[in-house]
Amino acid sequence: MKKVDYLIIGQGIAGLSFAYQLMNAGKSFLVVDTPQLKSSSSVAAGIMNPITGRRYVKSWMFDDLLKEAEQFYSSLETLLDCRVFHRIPIVRSLFNHQEEQDWWIRRQDQDYIPYMHPPMNNDAFPKGFKKVFAFAKVAKGGRVDIHGLVEAFKVYLNERGLIISDLLDYKSLDLRDDHCVWKEQSFGKVICCEGAHVMNNPFFRHLPFNPSKGEVLIIKAPELEGNSVFKNRIFIVPVDPPFYWVGSQYKRSYTDDNPEAESKHFLTERLEEVMDSPYEIIEHKAAIRPTVKDRKPFLGVHPDHSCLYLFNGLGTKGASLAPYFSKHLYAFISEGQPLMAEADIKRFY
Ligand SMILES: Cc1cc2nc3c(=O)[nH]c(=O)nc-3n(C[C@H](O)[C@H](O)[C@H](O)COP(=O)(O)OP(=O)(O)OC[C@H]3O[C@@H](n4cnc5c(N)ncnc54)[C@H](O)[C@@H]3O)c2cc1C
């Protein structure tokens, strides 16, 4: 029987990142991924946003995540000969005097200065948008072309016979004490990276996932400047100007992962509020994010099957979390290094 070190279920950004850690460590692996299911990675804008929310709070672990992500994506760009990581400022609208004051106050904190430029008055407001009270730029933000990366990596794996296109049936996994047999191949370990489809996985679906549906529009807007991400209630992201990603919606309650007319209406209304130049809607897409109640990643080993692991819970931040936490999970598996308590699935056992 052929022996392989790892089987990875799912090739979104989670499965891709773990596979890349294995490649760098010289381990053998096989990825199984199906086009029958919609992946969150194919819809995401890939924004890495250091300053979030109305209170302008620094994103959890952002310095460490950014450092790891820069190295990780740059190395993949070399391997795949494509550009996926874009350093790009995020322009945030400030709607009134109070918001401008709050920005200044937060900026007094030394930790925040590298990330928050001073507010600017609306004379310099980005072209093509309706002016508001003022605006400010968030520095050190980035955007990862997650979809492009996943597709390019799939081609790379395919050319080397390292991926198969199949919907894995969990009943076909024969889990033994220290390995697993699947389709007459023996795997030392199985890493489950199914995103929100983890709800079909009988070994891990009991964990408190709290998936959220997101919907986006792709628009063509020739008069926008295209050199920054624009945040004004919604994000408007230059993916390939004049094409922009507009999103997104957060829905906890939904019946399927198809785009809904009501969400298109919501996004169009927001666009009308911010745009001051012509645009055309090209596409409307939806997917389910693998979000978790406490908004932290979900890593760890199954309590009863020592060869079965989970790499999930990337939620709204797959682009920034995947590089760091794939490395972290691999160090746990290969060297026995402890998992961060906040990310370990044990926190819910
Ligand atoms: C609208 C929207 C906007 C977003 N914007 C951002 C953003 O700006 N920045 C950011 O960082 N993140 C963003 N995200 C979140 C990001 O998409 C996720 O964090 C990330 O893509 C999750 O990756 P994943 O690999 O865990 O899951 P997925 O990308 O969903 O991949 C899971 C893969 O597993 C496969 N699979 C599942 N079950 C099986 C099975 N049984 N057999 C075989 N294959 C299987 C699926 O086919 C899929 O390919 C956004 C998400 C949405 C929906």
Image (cartoon, grey):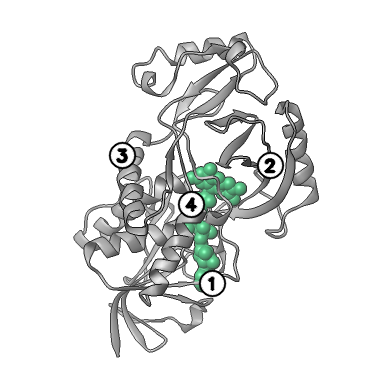
Residue 218 position in % (x across, y down)? 66, 46
Residue 316 visible at all: no
Q: Residues within 10 Å of mark 2 (few under 14, many from 20)?
A: many
Q: What kind of element bears circle 4?
A: helix
Residue 349 visible at all: yes
The disc labelled 1 sits on which kind of residue? Answer: Thr
Tell me the quarter of the picture where residue 326 sits: bottom left
Q: Residues within 10 Å of mark 3 (few under 14, many from 20)?
A: few
Q: CA distance from mark 4 to mark 1?
A: 17 Å
Q: Residues within 10 Å of mark 1 (few under 14, many from 20)?
A: some
Query: Which residue is the site of mark 4?
Result: 146
N-terminal of the two: label 2 or label 1? Answer: 1
Q: CA distance from mark 3 to mark 1?
A: 31 Å
Query: Which residue is the site of mark 1?
Result: 34
Q: Nearer the viewer, residue 297 or 155?
A: 155
Tell me the quarter of the picture where residue 140 sits: top left
Report the residue at 61% width, 55% height from top.
288
Q: Horizontal placement of 172 versus 219: left or right?
A: left
Q: Are marks 3 and 1 in contact (CB under 8 Å)?
A: no
Query: Which residue is the site of mark 3?
Result: 67
Q: Horizontal placement of 224 versus 255: left or right?
A: left
N-terminal of the two: label 2 or label 4? Answer: 4
Q: What kind of element bears circle 2?
A: strand
Q: Within 8 Å: ligand 1 and the Cβ of disc 4?
A: yes
Tell me the quarter of the picture where residue 219 sits: top right
Q: Horizontal placement of 209 versus 264: left or right?
A: left
The disc labelled 4 sits on which kind of residue? Answer: Ile
N-terminal of the two: label 2 or label 3? Answer: 3
Q: Is residue 155 above or below residue 2?
A: above
